[in-house]
Image (cartoon, rainbow, N blue to C red):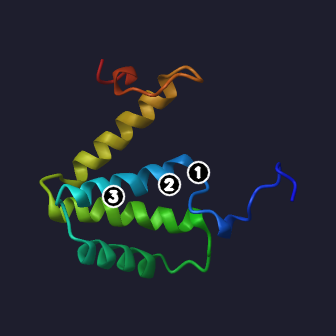
Amino acid sequence: MNPHDTAPEEDVAFTAPWQAQAFALTVALHERGVFTWPDWAQALSTALAEDGQPENSTEAYYRCWLVALERILCTHSTIEPEQITRMMRAWQRAAEATPHGTPISLANDPVSS
C-alpha cells in the first residue's frame, strides 16, 4: 500500500475537520447532561429521515447531524433558534475578516466590534 494513498470516504469517520468538531461538541454536550443518548438518536434519526436525499456520503450525514444538534439544543436547553442563527452569521463574518492561516475568533467579527 502506498503511504500517500487515502482511504475511500466510506472508510473514514470524518472527511472534514468540522465533522469531527460537530461530533466532539455533541459528545461534550451529552456528557454535561444537556440531552440523553435516546433523545440524540431520535433527533438524528428524524433529521436523516427528513433529508431524504439518496446521497450516502459523510458530508450529507454530518449536515443532518448539525440539523439534529441545532434542534436538540433548542428543545433541551435555553438557546433559541435565533441565537444559533446570530452566532452562525457572526462566525461567518469573523471567518471572512480573518487573515488566511490565522485562527478564527469572534473578536474579528466587524459587526460586533
Total label count? Answer: 3
- Identity, as a three-letter code, of the amino acid under mark 2: Gln
Q: What percent of the width, then of the height, locates residue 108? A: 39, 21
- Point out the tag, 3 or 1, that comes first from the N-terminus: 1
Q: Which residue is mark 2?
A: 19
Q: What number is the disc on residue 16?
A: 1
> Residue at coordinates 51% horizontally, 28% vertically from top-left?
96
Q: Is residue 112 above or below residue 57?
A: above
Element marked by disc 1: loop
Q: Nearer the viewer, residue 4 or 48?
A: 4
- Identity, as a three-letter code, of the amino acid under mark 1: Ala
Please identify the quarter of the rendering in which residue 47 is found: bottom left
- Point out the tag, 2 or 3, that comes first from the N-terminus: 2
Figure quadrant of the N terminus: bottom right
Q: What percent of the width, then of the height, locates residue 86? A: 29, 41
Q: Nearer the viewer, residue 32 or 17?
A: 32
Query: Distance between the Cα atoms at labels 2 and 3?
Result: 11 Å
